Image: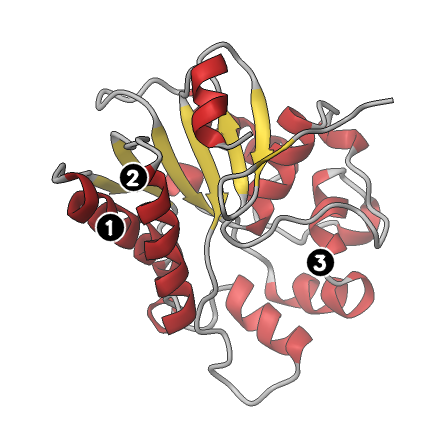
Amino acid sequence: MNIYDFAQHHGLKAITRRHFAYNKQVLPVDNNTLCTLIYSRTICTEQLGLSGAGSDAAVKQCQLLAQLGILPKVMVSGIDLRNVDGARLTAAAIAVNSGKPVPCIKSPAVTYPYYDATATLKAYQEFGDQAVHMYLAEKPEVAGLWTEPASVFEARITAAISANYPHGSPVLFDLNFEQMTMLHFLHVEKISRLDIPTDKNAWCPTMGGGIAYGTDGAAMEFTPEFEMIIKIID
Protein backbone atom coordinates (compact mmCIF):
# COMPACT_ATOMS: atom_id res chain seq x y z
CA MET A 1 0.00 0.00 0.00
CA ASN A 2 1.30 3.44 -0.88
CA ILE A 3 0.05 6.90 0.01
CA TYR A 4 -2.24 6.97 -3.04
CA ASP A 5 -3.96 3.79 -1.84
CA PHE A 6 -4.26 5.31 1.64
CA ALA A 7 -5.89 8.42 0.16
CA GLN A 8 -8.35 6.31 -1.81
CA HIS A 9 -9.46 4.53 1.37
CA HIS A 10 -9.32 7.36 3.90
CA GLY A 11 -9.13 10.65 2.02
CA LEU A 12 -6.07 12.81 2.64
CA LYS A 13 -6.19 15.83 4.95
CA ALA A 14 -2.51 16.26 5.83
CA ILE A 15 0.97 14.86 5.30
CA THR A 16 3.66 15.41 7.92
CA ARG A 17 7.28 14.49 7.28
CA ARG A 18 10.66 14.92 8.88
CA HIS A 19 13.01 17.24 6.95
CA PHE A 20 15.80 15.83 4.80
CA ALA A 21 19.57 15.87 5.44
CA TYR A 22 21.02 19.31 6.12
CA ASN A 23 24.41 21.04 6.41
CA LYS A 24 25.24 20.06 9.96
CA GLN A 25 29.04 19.88 10.08
CA VAL A 26 29.63 23.62 10.32
CA LEU A 27 32.08 23.57 13.26
CA PRO A 28 34.96 21.20 14.23
CA VAL A 29 33.45 20.12 17.57
CA ASP A 30 32.21 16.83 19.04
CA ASN A 31 28.68 15.69 18.19
CA ASN A 32 27.09 16.53 21.56
CA THR A 33 28.48 20.07 21.46
CA LEU A 34 27.39 20.45 17.83
CA CYS A 35 23.87 19.28 18.64
CA THR A 36 23.71 21.74 21.52
CA LEU A 37 24.81 24.65 19.33
CA ILE A 38 22.35 23.74 16.59
CA TYR A 39 19.31 22.93 18.71
CA SER A 40 19.74 25.99 20.93
CA ARG A 41 20.07 28.04 17.72
CA THR A 42 23.43 29.40 18.86
CA ILE A 43 24.61 28.72 15.32
CA CYS A 44 22.82 30.96 12.84
CA THR A 45 20.07 28.87 11.25
CA GLU A 46 20.91 30.37 7.84
CA GLN A 47 23.98 28.09 7.85
CA LEU A 48 21.84 25.00 8.33
CA GLY A 49 19.91 24.60 5.08
CA LEU A 50 19.48 21.32 3.25
CA SER A 51 22.63 19.68 1.93
CA GLY A 52 23.01 18.76 -1.72
CA ALA A 53 21.90 15.21 -0.96
CA GLY A 54 18.99 16.44 1.14
CA SER A 55 17.86 18.83 -1.57
CA ASP A 56 18.02 16.08 -4.16
CA ALA A 57 16.00 13.76 -1.92
CA ALA A 58 13.32 16.41 -1.38
CA VAL A 59 12.91 16.96 -5.12
CA LYS A 60 12.83 13.23 -5.93
CA GLN A 61 10.29 12.52 -3.21
CA CYS A 62 7.91 15.16 -4.47
CA GLN A 63 8.33 14.12 -8.07
CA LEU A 64 7.08 10.75 -6.85
CA LEU A 65 4.20 12.41 -5.00
CA ALA A 66 3.17 14.22 -8.19
CA GLN A 67 3.42 10.98 -10.19
CA LEU A 68 1.04 9.40 -7.69
CA GLY A 69 -1.41 12.19 -8.43
CA ILE A 70 -1.27 13.74 -4.96
CA LEU A 71 -0.82 17.50 -5.07
CA PRO A 72 -0.60 19.40 -1.76
CA LYS A 73 -2.62 22.60 -1.75
CA VAL A 74 -0.11 24.35 0.53
CA MET A 75 3.24 23.69 2.17
CA VAL A 76 3.61 24.62 5.84
CA SER A 77 7.07 24.50 7.40
CA GLY A 78 8.90 25.50 10.52
CA ILE A 79 10.88 28.74 10.37
CA ASP A 80 14.35 27.14 10.25
CA LEU A 81 16.13 27.03 6.90
CA ARG A 82 16.23 23.24 6.61
CA ASN A 83 12.41 23.20 6.82
CA VAL A 84 11.95 26.21 4.54
CA ASP A 85 14.30 24.66 1.97
CA GLY A 86 12.32 21.42 2.02
CA ALA A 87 9.02 23.21 1.58
CA ARG A 88 10.24 25.38 -1.30
CA LEU A 89 11.92 22.50 -3.13
CA THR A 90 8.79 20.40 -2.70
CA ALA A 91 6.61 23.17 -4.08
CA ALA A 92 8.97 23.70 -7.02
CA ALA A 93 9.11 20.00 -7.88
CA ILE A 94 5.33 19.70 -7.78
CA ALA A 95 4.92 22.81 -9.94
CA VAL A 96 7.32 21.44 -12.55
CA ASN A 97 5.55 18.08 -12.64
CA SER A 98 1.96 19.34 -12.46
CA GLY A 99 2.06 22.90 -13.73
CA LYS A 100 0.29 24.02 -10.57
CA PRO A 101 1.96 26.44 -8.13
CA VAL A 102 1.94 25.50 -4.44
CA PRO A 103 2.16 28.31 -1.84
CA CYS A 104 4.64 27.96 1.03
CA ILE A 105 4.02 29.21 4.55
CA LYS A 106 6.73 29.26 7.22
CA SER A 107 5.01 29.15 10.56
CA PRO A 108 6.19 29.53 14.18
CA ALA A 109 3.22 27.33 15.11
CA VAL A 110 4.91 24.21 13.72
CA THR A 111 8.54 25.15 14.47
CA TYR A 112 10.63 22.79 16.58
CA PRO A 113 11.17 23.90 20.19
CA TYR A 114 13.85 26.25 21.45
CA TYR A 115 16.43 24.43 23.56
CA ASP A 116 18.28 25.65 26.64
CA ALA A 117 21.99 25.30 25.81
CA THR A 118 23.20 24.20 29.26
CA ALA A 119 20.44 21.64 29.75
CA THR A 120 20.86 20.35 26.19
CA LEU A 121 24.58 19.61 26.51
CA LYS A 122 24.01 17.71 29.75
CA ALA A 123 21.02 15.78 28.39
CA TYR A 124 22.67 14.77 25.11
CA GLN A 125 25.86 13.67 26.84
CA GLU A 126 23.80 11.37 29.04
CA PHE A 127 20.80 10.32 26.93
CA GLY A 128 21.39 11.23 23.27
CA ASP A 129 18.29 11.57 21.08
CA GLN A 130 16.17 9.86 23.72
CA ALA A 131 16.31 13.13 25.65
CA VAL A 132 13.47 14.25 23.36
CA HIS A 133 11.34 11.24 24.27
CA MET A 134 12.09 11.87 27.94
CA TYR A 135 11.15 15.54 27.79
CA LEU A 136 7.90 14.72 26.02
CA ALA A 137 7.13 12.19 28.76
CA GLU A 138 8.06 14.82 31.39
CA LYS A 139 10.91 12.87 32.96
CA PRO A 140 12.62 14.96 35.67
CA GLU A 141 16.12 14.03 34.47
CA VAL A 142 15.71 16.37 31.48
CA ALA A 143 13.74 19.17 33.11
CA GLY A 144 14.44 22.53 31.47
CA LEU A 145 15.58 21.04 28.16
CA TRP A 146 13.18 23.21 26.16
CA THR A 147 11.95 26.72 26.79
CA GLU A 148 8.32 25.58 26.61
CA PRO A 149 6.56 22.84 28.58
CA ALA A 150 5.90 19.61 26.71
CA SER A 151 2.16 20.16 27.21
CA VAL A 152 2.36 23.50 25.37
CA PHE A 153 4.38 21.91 22.56
CA GLU A 154 1.74 19.19 22.22
CA ALA A 155 -1.10 21.71 22.13
CA ARG A 156 0.42 23.96 19.46
CA ILE A 157 1.66 21.19 17.15
CA THR A 158 -1.51 19.12 17.24
CA ALA A 159 -3.65 22.25 16.74
CA ALA A 160 -1.59 23.27 13.71
CA ILE A 161 -1.73 19.80 12.15
CA SER A 162 -5.47 19.37 12.63
CA ALA A 163 -6.43 22.90 11.54
CA ASN A 164 -8.44 23.57 8.40
CA TYR A 165 -6.34 25.75 6.08
CA PRO A 166 -8.07 28.10 3.63
CA HIS A 167 -6.03 26.69 0.73
CA GLY A 168 -7.75 23.31 1.10
CA SER A 169 -6.25 19.86 1.60
CA PRO A 170 -4.00 18.02 1.62
CA VAL A 171 -1.53 20.20 3.52
CA LEU A 172 2.10 19.04 3.55
CA PHE A 173 4.05 19.93 6.70
CA ASP A 174 7.86 19.93 6.76
CA LEU A 175 8.79 19.24 10.39
CA ASN A 176 11.62 18.00 12.63
CA PHE A 177 12.60 15.11 14.87
CA GLU A 178 10.71 16.49 17.88
CA GLN A 179 7.33 17.04 16.23
CA MET A 180 7.44 13.76 14.31
CA THR A 181 8.42 11.76 17.39
CA MET A 182 5.46 13.10 19.34
CA LEU A 183 2.97 12.79 16.47
CA HIS A 184 4.01 9.19 15.82
CA PHE A 185 3.30 8.09 19.35
CA LEU A 186 0.11 10.13 19.70
CA HIS A 187 -1.49 9.33 16.35
CA VAL A 188 0.09 6.15 14.98
CA GLU A 189 0.83 4.23 18.17
CA LYS A 190 -2.16 5.95 19.86
CA ILE A 191 -0.58 6.36 23.27
CA SER A 192 -0.58 9.42 25.49
CA ARG A 193 2.38 11.78 25.54
CA LEU A 194 3.25 10.86 29.13
CA ASP A 195 3.49 7.20 28.11
CA ILE A 196 5.99 7.74 25.28
CA PRO A 197 8.77 5.15 25.68
CA THR A 198 12.19 6.51 26.64
CA ASP A 199 14.50 3.51 26.25
CA LYS A 200 17.38 3.43 23.77
CA ASN A 201 15.34 1.31 21.35
CA ALA A 202 12.38 3.70 21.25
CA TRP A 203 11.13 4.59 17.78
CA CYS A 204 12.77 7.59 16.06
CA PRO A 205 11.67 9.29 12.82
CA THR A 206 13.45 8.82 9.50
CA MET A 207 14.39 11.82 7.38
CA GLY A 208 11.79 12.08 4.63
CA GLY A 209 9.45 9.64 6.37
CA GLY A 210 6.24 10.76 7.96
CA ILE A 211 2.54 10.32 8.65
CA ALA A 212 -0.47 10.51 6.33
CA TYR A 213 -3.69 11.78 7.91
CA GLY A 214 -7.01 10.80 6.39
CA THR A 215 -10.08 12.99 6.26
CA ASP A 216 -11.76 10.22 8.27
CA GLY A 217 -9.27 10.53 11.16
CA ALA A 218 -6.99 7.64 10.13
CA ALA A 219 -3.24 8.09 10.59
CA MET A 220 -0.55 5.85 9.11
CA GLU A 221 3.23 6.06 8.91
CA PHE A 222 4.99 6.11 5.53
CA THR A 223 8.55 5.59 4.33
CA PRO A 224 10.46 8.26 2.34
CA GLU A 225 9.20 6.40 -0.78
CA PHE A 226 5.57 6.89 0.36
CA GLU A 227 5.06 3.21 1.12
CA MET A 228 2.71 2.84 4.07
CA ILE A 229 3.89 1.02 7.20
CA ILE A 230 1.06 -1.04 8.63
CA LYS A 231 1.25 -1.41 12.40
CA ILE A 232 0.09 -4.70 13.85
CA ILE A 233 -1.00 -4.24 17.45
CA ASP A 234 -1.16 -7.33 19.66
The residue where tag 3 is placed is 129
For the N terminus, which image quadrant? top right
Distance Cα–Cα, label 3 vs label 2: 33 Å
Q: Residue at x 35, y 60 (%)?
A: 81
Q: Secondary structure at mark 3?
A: loop
Name which quarter of the figure residue 67 lies in: top left
From the viewer's perspective, is the residue at label 3 or at label 2 nearer?
Answer: 2
Comparing 88 with 193, the one in front is 88
Q: Residue at x 42, y 27 (%)?
A: 14
The residue where tag 2 is placed is 66
Q: Residue at x 50, y 23 (%)?
A: 6
Residue 51 lies, in percent from the top left, at 40, 71
Name the residue type under label 2: Ala
Residue 140 lies, in percent from the top left, at 82, 46
Check if mark 2's residue and mark 1's residue have beta carbons within 8 Å. yes
Chain-order first, disc 3 or disc 1 = 1
